[in-house]
Amino acid sequence: MMTSDPMTSASASTSAPVPTPSVLGADAIRGFTPPSNCLDGKTILVTGAGSGIGRVAALTYAKYGATVLLLGKTLSKLEAVYDDIEQAGGKQAAILPLDLQTASFADMQQLANVIETEFGTLDGLLHNAAILGALTPLEMYDIDTFEKVMQVNSTAVFMLTQVLLPLLKNAANGSIVFTTSSVGSQPRAFWGAYALSKQAVEGMSAIFTQETKNTTALRFNCINPGATRTNMRAHAYPGEDPRTLKTPEDLMAGYVCLMSDASIAVQGQVIDLQPKS
């Protein structure tokens, strides 16, 4: 007959309960003040890292201690970001040239194998790369353009997520962040394939969340950066004064928060970084 050890019982009865991580609200995520080195020890892949929000996110993640993997189609732009990280004293980044418009599933699998071989782990994935396509009625939308937009903004996002899931699941607190748009949540006339692709991304995040939340520590969320001073915004609104818009640097608190352990209880959310009042 087994008897309990009185010392063990006493220890068990007096041990403090493990605290439940707090669920940050959207305001807390937008107003997050990143502690120094809050991403230290994390390896984060950023798509579309050569320019715009992706470039600034990569530099910011490096600033807070992450090892950043730079994915994009233009090698010279990735090399410039790599050099900026090095000059700022960040951890050595890695350049992963890949054109999401033409990349096959086999290309994605090869990329995952390279990351596993070279780094052994992956803690975060920021899906930032996207193309605008045409702003025109759906009944007139060019089919080739439609396919390109859906490939870059949705299909490639799915394939890359799927091949990297094993690595991300092995992370202590893995985070996948999809970039969405206001037209992803509220489709708008003339935004065509871009709006449909962002609806797909938001649905993807929700489904992945439901399928993994009880079996892994992995979390999926979407960020809507809102009107931001980028080349894509300038193409969509050519008559707009860019000086009236926030810069990518202005929005980085939310991007850092969702990659840091401060947000480990945030799952399946769409975070608007510039909500309309």
Image (cartoon, rainbow, N blue to C red):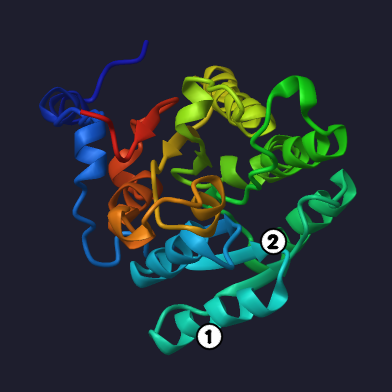
Q: Secondary structure at mark 1?
A: helix
Q: Residue 179's spot in the image, x, y percent?
A: 51, 41
- Residue picked out by circle 2: 115
Question: If you read the primary sequence from the N terminus, does the residue marked by circle 1 or circle 2 appear first?
Answer: 1
Q: Residue 72's spot in the image, x, y percent?
A: 67, 63
- Residue picked out by circle 1: 83
- Residue drawn at (32%, 40%), measured in percent from left and top? 273
Q: Residue furthest top?
A: 1
In the image, residue 24 sits, relative to residue 260, either above or below, namely above
Q: Is residue 213 visible?
A: no
**Classed neighbour count for the residue bearing mark 1: other residues with Cα under 10 Å, few (<14), some (14–19), many (≥20):** some
137 to the left or right of 216: right
The quadrant holding residue 99 is bottom right
40 to the left or right of 14: right
Given residues 238 and 230, the one toward you in this image is: 238
141 to the left or right of 176: right
The residue under label 2 is which amino acid type? Ile
Using the numbered discs, state the Cα–Cα distance from disc 1 to disc 2 in whole angstroms.
20 Å
Q: Are marks 1 and 2 in contact (CB under 8 Å)?
A: no
**Quadrant (top left/top right/bottom left/bottom right) for the N terminus:** top left
- Residue drawn at (26%, 29%), measured in percent from left and top? 23
